[in-house]
Image (cartoon, rainbow, N blue to C red):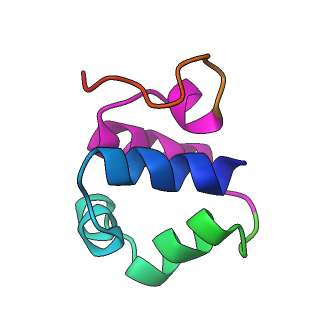
Amino acid sequence: MFGRRFAAIREHRGLTQAELAAAIGKSEQTIRAWENMICGQVSLSDLKQCACALRCSVRDLLGLIYDPIPPAA
């Protein structure tokens, strides 16, 4: 669930995996792993960086709200 939601928000914001990776100082492979859930846990620090780059909240990324795609802040 997290991976699909994460990818949907990224796509909704018009960012490629490479662009998001560059924005948060991670590799494109890391973003791909998170989206495909082939990694361990994503740290809170990484979630916060992603939320900032994607102009949403950590709650949005984790699906703790009703709206499937949060509005841009």
Q: Is residue 44 magenta?
A: yes
Specify whether 8 is left or right of 37.
left
Residue 45 on image: x %, y %: 51, 46
Pick the front one: 70 or 46:
70
Up-down relation of residue 65 to residue 37 (above or below) = above
Q: Residue at x 42, y 44 (%)?
A: 9
User: Furthest-top residue in view?
Assistant: 66
Up-down relation of residue 37 to residue 5 (above or below) = below
**In which quadrant of the rendered view does residue 71 lie?**
top left
Tell me the magenta residue range.
41-62
Q: Is residue 46 visible?
A: no
Q: How many circles with numbers are drawn on the protein? A: 0
Specify whether 10 is left or right of 66.
left
Q: Is residue 12 visible?
A: yes
Specify whether 24 is left or right of 40.
left
Up-down relation of residue 52 to residue 71 (above or below) = below
Q: Is residue 3 magenta?
A: no
Pick the front one: 1 or 39:
1
**In which quadrant of the rendered view does residue 15 lie?**
bottom left
Q: Quadrant of the C terminus?
A: top left
Specify whether 16 is left or right of 56.
left
Q: Looking at the magenta stretch, what is its main secondary structure? A: helix
Q: Residue at x 36, y 70 (%)?
A: 17
**In which quadrant of the rendered view does residue 27 lie?**
bottom left
Residue 13 on image: x %, y %: 27, 45
Q: Residue at x 32, y 42 (%)?
A: 54
